[in-house]
Amino acid sequence: MKNFLTTNIGRLRLIGLLEGISLLVLIGIAVPAKHLLGDPTLVKAIGPIHGVLFLLFVFNTLSVGVEYQWKFKTTTWKVLLACLVPFGTFYIDRKILSKIEPTAD
């Protein structure tokens, strides 16, 4: 857990987890509440939070990609694509990010 806050790869994994959860809450709870109940409150609250987490994930992916000298064609694009697909950040964390040995900042 300490590595989630003290290393760049840990922060990327944490942001990916939060981004994935925010997307699930947005499409699983907020959007149905907006359309079925006519209440856009949750979308207005969660939408911007998800947007910020999405951007943080993208910027941190690029930063970690440079730090770890990822080849764009083999790794970076997969991690970037993950944030566009529901459950993608969870999948990419398990398949790629969790296997990377963190380096101390």
Image (tube, helix red, strand yellow):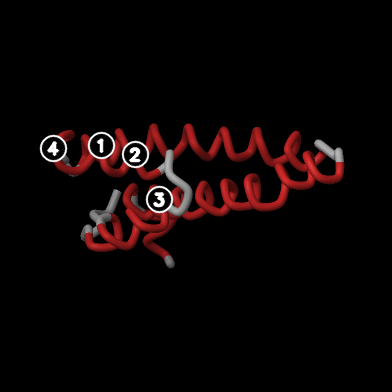
The kind of secondary structure element at disc 3 is: helix
Mark 4 vs mark 3, CA separation in Å: 20 Å
Who's the residue at 43% across and 39% down the image? 84
Q: Which residue is mark 3?
A: 88
31, 8: nearer the viewer: 31
Who's the residue at 32% across and 62% down the image? 94
Mark found first going from the N terminus, 2 or 3:
2
Which of pointers 4 and 1 indicates the residue nearer the eye?
1
Tell which residue pokes out farthest to the right in this image: 38
Mark 4 vs mark 1, CA separation in Å: 9 Å
Who's the residue at 69% across and 41% down the image? 46
60, 103: nearer the viewer: 60
Q: Which label number is shown at residue 86?
A: none
Badge 2 amino acid: Leu
Position of 42 with respect to 78 (left or right) is right
Contact, CB < 8 Å: mark 1 with mark 2? Answer: yes
The kind of secondary structure element at disc 1 is: helix
Q: Which residue is mark 1?
A: 77
Mark 1 vs mark 2, CA separation in Å: 6 Å
User: Is the residue 20 above or below the residue 46 in the image?
Assistant: below
Residue 93 lies in quadrant: bottom left
Mark found first going from the N terminus, 4 or 1:
4
Contact, CB < 8 Å: mark 2 with mark 3? Answer: yes
Mark 3 vs mark 1, CA separation in Å: 12 Å
Q: Which label number is shown at residue 71?
A: 4
